[in-house]
Amino acid sequence: MGLEIKQQLRMSQQLKMTPQLQQAIKLLQLSRMELVELVRQEMEENPVLEEGQDTEREKKDVDVEFERPTDMALEGIDSERQAQVERDRVPDATSEVGDGSAAEGSREIDWDAYLEHHTLAPPMPSYRPTNDELPSIEATYTRKPSLTDHLVWQLRMQDLDQQEERIGMLIIGNLEPMGYLKDPPLEDIGKVADAPMIVVEDILSLIQTFDPLGVAARDLGECLMIQARHVGQDDEIVTRIIRDHLHNLERKNYQAICKDLDQPLDEIIEAVKVIAAFDPKPGRLYADEDPVYITPDVYIHKIGDKYFVVPNDDGLPKLKISNFYRSALKGGTKERQYVQEKLRSAQWLIRSIQQRQRTIIRVSESIVRFQREFFDNGINFLRPLILRDVAEDIGMHESTISRVTTNKYVHTPQGIFELKFFFNSSINRMDGDDIASESVKKRIKDIISGEEGKKPFSDQKIVELLREQNIDIARRTVAKYREQMGILSSSKRKQLF
């Protein structure tokens, strides 16, 4: 078979994502906080970008300032208009000097009289006024003490030698956020500290007496026993329940505990009450989990019978092109090329932000059209909705809708929700239209909240109660929704005391 070289002309189409399109897609899926951080970073890296001030003078300069993302306009620079703006900014030398001298005379201060009055004045009070509404001194700390800080402070209050203190620091440094010592084992800590195991165990026992009680335990049973010994409740029944029957305690299978310990139910319940007062997670008070505050991307207001979608621009930097770098466009080739490149980058960033805001508004308006009954009456009237419905309504692709609704929040008359919340699968009704899964979850939660503590509803009973409301749902679906809402099973919800 002979080999030969040929030339062929072939036409084909390929989808190539330009850097500008990639940037627009990236901005579209960012949350509000991530967007603010990205804009701040771009302002640091791109000298052409700067944050505009919300003043009347700058509002007139519409050709160089880019207002909030929904009002940004990218237009050419009108030289005559710009020249007029610059002339407006030139101060009147005569009036400035005249006003300045008059103001200087009116602000003249008799420093001798001031110092004499300040010397004779009574000292300022150094005490803190008693007011229950004021925060405590501890609440004004820049950083609250962590569990490690609290334990190290207690460790250094002990009379320990250098090796013992090193062992204590190793133990404290390996504690989990909830206060448990699960890894590494004590043998490894002893090897690192080059200390015998008896010394390591003594230091561990010492740390287990620190506040909070139960800290440095290696498992739940040890944590509970430390607290039981401290309060003097480590009798035989409590000790055996903690040691042998934590699994029955979790399932509230008190009959099995009674049978194994050969004790009456009253005695077991009294012991369970003691154990229930202990804290299984002693380090939770010192956890570094600060609350995360949600800032909505859009507001939905109801005025009369109509709903209006308003973007939330608070906290988003207003971008404009720096006037300082405009003079560089008149410079040499290298300077002009650099400024033009940064200018294009700034313009694309502003256009991408503008497109992002417009897309979020359009998606929100479409959601309002589909979920009008929810906004009027609440979660029980939430309709089944999928991404394709909104995509077809506003003429966009489903992937775009998915990016827009991820980590975006909306403030509504019914509360603050993630945009993803409005997209639900459908549950069949026995008659009538389908119902959204979120509405079914709400009804399951309402049913459980109204049950008797000593006779909780089983999943099958919840299925029967939902069928009375014309909702056809399987028992496993009820169990799945219950677990998603963090609700325990009926056996664990049962209250005996």
Image: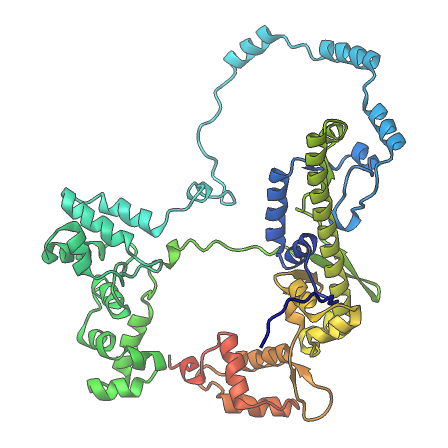
The residue depicted at 42 percent of the width and 43 percent of the height is 138
Tell me which colouring the rendered structure shows. rainbow
As drawn, which residue projects farthest toward the front? Answer: 2
Q: Position of residue 403 (x, y in %)?
A: 65, 64
State the residue in front, 268 or 466. 466
State the residue in front, 115 or 405. 405
Question: Residue 142, relative to residue 458: is it above or below?
Answer: above
Quarter of the image for the N terminus: give it.
bottom right
Question: Residue 472, relative to residue 166: is it above or below?
Answer: below
Q: Position of residue 153 (x, y in %)?
A: 28, 44
Q: Position of residue 6 (x, y in %)?
A: 67, 67
Quarter of the image for the C terminus: give it.
bottom left
Relative placement, left or right, of 190 versus 478 is left
Q: Position of residue 473 (x, y in %)?
A: 59, 89
As drawn, which residue projects farthest toward the right? Answer: 80
State the residue in front, 133 or 190. 190
Relative placement, left or right, of 408 versus 139 is right
Picture quadrant where residue 285 is located: bottom left
The residue depicted at 18 percent of the width and 52 percent of the height is 192
Picture quadrant where residue 245 is located: bottom left
The residue depicted at 16 percent of the width and 50 percent of the height is 193
- Whether residue 358 is visible, yes or no, is yes
- Whether residue 300 is visible, yes or no, is no
Number of numbered discs overlaid on the protein picture = 0
As drawn, which residue projects farthest toward the top? Answer: 112
Question: Residue 439, relative to residue 132: is it above or below?
Answer: below
Question: Residue 372, relative to residue 434: is it above or below?
Answer: above
Picture quadrant where residue 339 is located: top right
Relative placement, left or right, of 123 versus 44 is left
